[in-house]
Image (cartoon, rainbow, N blue to C red):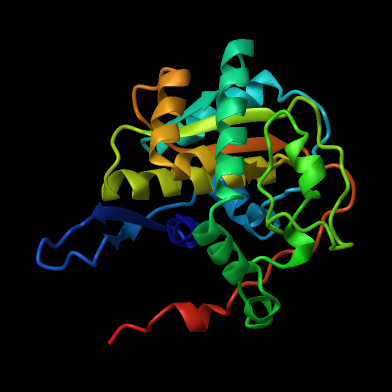
């Protein structure tokens, strides 16, 4: 999506073809420049917001999301072929919150999960320019687990890091589920582009997101979440959205572009 956006800002139109070559299953998508056009101002605005886009695991201001933004963000997701379902009704919020809490507790007792978590939060991994540093862990496990929708504990139960925010988390977060019509590779690609469009719209409007994806990582709970809010499609992400409160932590490290893109030829 960011490549499409950058091309648009350079006045190029483009098209994405999903799984374009049955003989090359590893080729999940092909982006083709199709001609010239004047970039919509909306695309320039989203591209300008890209550097500010980040995951925020510290508290948000306890403010409701204005209705015009809810409509605009939902329309943005719709335009990419996905859907955005706001979790608003009291019963639905309680049900989804219970599933998030159940999944968080199951994962925090799973040795394989904790090993993977440690792999991506280890100091040596962060020193290599990737992973999640302690400054991005967000609130402590105590504060995160006391929230209405429990936040993931990136420290795996350890409360020793002084960089973590002690909370509390906002009592009534804005929560939404991003869904796709199906649950195959094409749907995941559609969902990813819809997610980026949503996150950039949020960043441009002064908001940010974090994720409550724990139940989506456990197949049985994922189906329960789908049933809980009566989704027609498939839940791909559960988002907590809001306006960041206080000083933002440093951005997590990213590898240089040259290390993750292979030149053609």
| Residue at screen point 57% across, 34% down | 102
Q: Which of 153 and 238 is in front in this view?
A: 153
Can residue 179 be seen here?
no
How many numbered badges does the structure rendering display? Answer: 0
Can residue 68 be seen here?
yes
169 left or right of 6 in image: right
- Residue 232 x %, y %: 34, 22
Q: Which of 2 and 141 is in front in this view?
A: 141
52 left or right of 261 in image: right
Q: Which of 123 and 234 is in front in this view?
A: 123
| Residue at screen point 56% across, 65% down | 115
Is 152 rendered above or below residue 61?
below
- Residue 65 x %, y %: 71, 25
- Residue 260 x %, y %: 47, 78
Residue lying at the far bottom in this picture: please name it.
265
Is 45 rendered above or below residue 27?
above
Is 81 rendered above or below residue 117?
above
Is 189 rendered above or below residue 34?
above
Looking at the rendered image, the quarter that the C terminus falls into is: bottom left
| Residue at screen point 59% across, 50% down | 109
| Residue at screen point 48% across, 63% down | 10
The quadrant where residue 219 appears: top left
- Residue 124 x %, y %: 66, 82
Looking at the rendered image, the quarter that the N terminus falls into is: bottom left
């Amino acid at each position: 999506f960011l490549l499409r956006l950058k091309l648009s800002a350079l006045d190029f139109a483009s098209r994405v073809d999903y799984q374009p070559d049955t003989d090359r299953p590893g080729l999940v998508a092909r982006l083709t420049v199709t001609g010239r056009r004047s970039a919509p101002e909306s695309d320039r605005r989203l591209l300008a917001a890209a550097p500010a886009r980040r995951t925020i695991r510290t508290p948000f201001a306890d403010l409701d999301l204005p209705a015009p933004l809810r409509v605009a963000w939902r329309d943005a997701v719709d335009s990419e072929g996905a859907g955005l379902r706001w979790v608003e009704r009291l019963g639905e919020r309680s049900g989804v919150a219970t599933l998030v809490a159940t999944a968080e507790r199951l994962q925090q007792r799973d040795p394989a999960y904790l090993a993977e978590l440690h792999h991506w939060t280890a100091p040596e991994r962060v020193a290599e320019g990737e992973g999640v540093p302690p400054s991005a862990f967000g609130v402590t496990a105590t504060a995160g687990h006391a929230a209405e929708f429990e936040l993931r504990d990136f420290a795996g139960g350890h409360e020793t890091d002084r960089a973590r925010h002690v909370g509390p988390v906002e009592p009534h977060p804005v929560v939404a589920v991003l869904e796709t019509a199906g649950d195959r590779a094409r749907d995941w690609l559609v969902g990813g582009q819809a997610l980026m469009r949503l996150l950039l719209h949020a960043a441009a409007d002064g908001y940010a997101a974090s994720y409550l994806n724990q139940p989506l990582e456990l197949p049985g709970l994922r189906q329960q979440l789908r049933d809980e809010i009566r989704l027609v499609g498939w839940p791909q992400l559960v988002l907590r959205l809001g306006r960041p409160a206080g000083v933002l932590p440093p951005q997590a490290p990213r590898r240089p572009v040259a290390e993750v893109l292979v030149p053609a030829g």
